[in-house]
Amino acid sequence: MSEKMHSGAHPMPTVDRAAASRAAVAARQARAELKRKLRSGEITPLRVLEQSLVPSSAAATLRITDFLLSFPAIGEVKADRVRRELEISEKKRLGGLGKLQRDRLTDFVRDRMGVADQGARPPLTVLAGPTAVGKGTVVSYIREHFPEVRLSVSATTRDPRPGEVDGSHYYFVDEERFDRMLASGDLLEWATVHNKYRYGTPRGPVVESAERGELMLLEIDLQGARQVRASMPEAKLVFLAPPSWDELVNRLVGRGTEDEEERARRLETAKVELAAAEEFDEIIVNDEVPRAAEQLLAVMRGERNASA
């Protein structure tokens, strides 16, 4: 190749082989730890199936054969027979299962564990997930198509904006009232936004809604979800996950609402948020908004697990 041609060609991308090697080692260690927890009973197979919905997680990269071998009384021969009955290739990883394959595997696991689909209706369902995953879109769909669902109303110390109604958009309170709510444990969670105004979720309306048998939904960030877990353990926490990392990037770029530096910052935050999925009770993949909304509603009704 001539010097002229070489100077006009695109440079070959550089590969950080050391970083790639470290990442591969970390991934193997994570899978080994996950298999250990499965065998010891520290984590249930159903929980691993839910975690496998999160792209690039240790559960997503676990091979179907290793998953089946974690069950008591299932050896190589039986694992192979079960896998063939489920019509799943031995090369498949949990994160790469098709919908029908996942459904068949979930049914097998439920039957093996003696787990029923029915569950108790939670007093509050919390929806959280990484940036740009589509939480607001799913909630808007539910608001439009499922009017029986009540959306939690936050309290705030800021003044009402034009058109906002107290008790509908927010509960507008002064700083003193907010302090009293905090001191008396009346808030499930709270945060200061932009170092100025405080926002929080009142406990009373959630409890009253549950007593009336209503379905209550709270869309919130990861930190708020953790606070709700601590203050109301009986609440159901649902993690909304993207179909893949690439799709999450595409959604964030497609919004066109952030510059390149802000997108990079949000994507780094999203990586941390995705890693927190295992803290949640349920994981729903937002591949199609109507389907994700239906699954979320099923969880709220206590009808079945999101991944079933």
Image: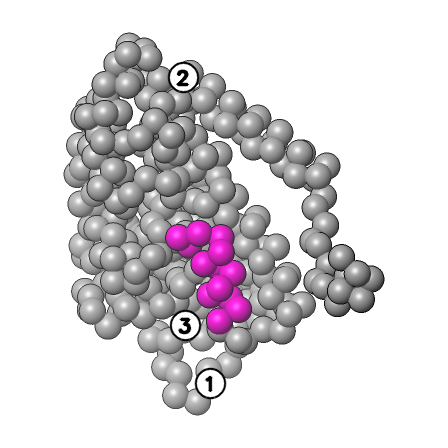
Check disc 1 and report the residue beneath it.
Answer: 161
Figure quadrant of residue 78: top left
Can residue 39 be spotted in the picture? yes
Mark 3 residue type: Tyr
Check disc 2 and report the residue beneath it.
Answer: 39
Q: Quadrant of the C terminus?
A: top left
**166 above or below 273?**
below
Count of labels in the image: 3
Q: Which tag, 3 or 1, sits closer to the chain's start?
A: 1
> Disc 3 versus disc 1: distance between alpha carbons?
12 Å
Are discs 3 and 1 less than 8 Å apart at CB?
no
What secondary structure is marked by label 1?
Answer: loop
**38 above or below 151?**
above
> Disc 2 versus disc 1: distance between alpha carbons?
55 Å
Q: Which residue is drawn at the image coordinates 40% and 17% (left, top)?
A: 39
The x and y percentages for residue 250 are 49, 64
Q: Which tag, 2 or 3, sits closer to the chain's start?
A: 2
Mark 2 residue type: Arg
Q: Judge from the rendering whether residue 222 lies leftward or rightward of residue 74; answer left or right.
A: right
Q: Which residue is drawn at the image coordinates 37% and 18% (left, top)?
A: 70
